[in-house]
């Protein structure tokens, strides 16, 4: 099912469920931003699991377009977890991160999940800004959790969004 939406800027995008066939393209996006990138095989293995789901954002237009953003999530025992989310640099600040996360929240509501959790690097201001705007609040802190080359070891914020 395609979920069209329109932005008052240059580009129009549509969200679609992420499939195993998107694994190689999302691995390329992931590599842009993460110190320990996941391979296409790792994405494929995750997407084959029944508890894992996600969405891809593509520019609308003629022909098949590779995703310019995606989110991967898991739902188990009534709790959701964001495994990863990324938007290509050229497509940021146009609402795609928000739309992708909102699609996960809607699916979790439909599945009657209790809460959505995630971990985020405490130095990642854009992601923390996005999550706070979506109603997440901090419920934990893991010191020295990430090994970013830019900042040295950094901590992770554990964040929760209530769904009931
Ligand atoms: C985090 C990320 C997914 C956000 O995607 P995006 O499409 O640019 O986000 P949106 O345009 O939907 O932004 C929604 C809101 O998030 C916040 N936000 C997004 N980018 C921000 C930034 N650079 N600084 C501060 N707040 C920001 C703002 O509140 C923004 O609303 P606004 O544009 O009306 O001010 C994107 O920056 C990204 O891919 N980063 C690299 C990967 C990553 O860090 N993933 C998260 C791992 S936990």
Image: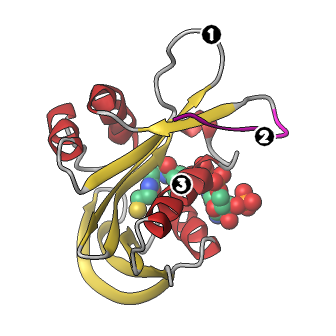
Residue named by callout 2: 7
Q: Relative to residue 147, is residue 8 drawn left or right?
A: right
Residue 7 in magenta stretch: yes
Q: Relative to residue 66, is residue 9 drawn left or right?
A: right
Residue named by callout 1: 62
Task: Say if 95 sits above or below 104 in the image.
Answer: above
Q: Residue furthest bottom?
A: 139
Marks 2/3: CA–CA distance: 16 Å
- Considering the numbered disc 2 on the image, is that residue within a helix, a strand or a loop? loop
Q: Name the residue nearer the viewer: 115 or 12.
A: 115
Q: Which residues are magenta?
A: 1-9
Residue at 55% over, 29% down: 58
Residue 37 in magenta stretch: no
Residue at 64% over, 23% down: 60
- Considering the numbered disc 3 on the image, is that residue within a helix, a strand or a loop? helix
Q: Quadrant of ligand 1?
A: bottom right
How crowded pointer 2 is (Cα within 10 Å; few <14, some 14-19, many 20+) is rated as few
Q: Main secondary structure of the magenta part?
A: loop
The image position of residue 115, as x and y in percent, is: 41, 79
Residue named by callout 3: 103
């Amino acid at each position: 099912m395609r979920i069209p939406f329109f932005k008052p800027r240059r580009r129009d995008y549509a969200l679609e469920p992420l499939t195993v066939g998107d694994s190689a393209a999302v691995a390329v996006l992931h590599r842009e931003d993460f110190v320990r990138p996941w391979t296409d095989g790792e994405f494929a293995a995750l997407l084959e699991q029944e508890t894992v789901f996600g969405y891809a954002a593509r520019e609308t237009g003629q022909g098949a377009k590779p995703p310019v953003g995606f989110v991967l999530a898991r739902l188990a025992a009534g709790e959701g977890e964001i495994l990863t989310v990324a938007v290509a640099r050229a497509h940021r600040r146009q609402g795609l991160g928000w739309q992708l996360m909102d699609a996960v929240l809607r699916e979790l509501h439909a599945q009657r999940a209790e809460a959505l959790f995630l971990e985020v690097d405490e130095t990642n201001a854009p992601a923390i800004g996005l999550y706070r705007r979506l109603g997440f609040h901090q419920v934990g802190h893991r010191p020295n959790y990430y090994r970013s080359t830019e900042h040295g070891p950094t901590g992770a914020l554990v964040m929760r969004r209530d769904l009931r």
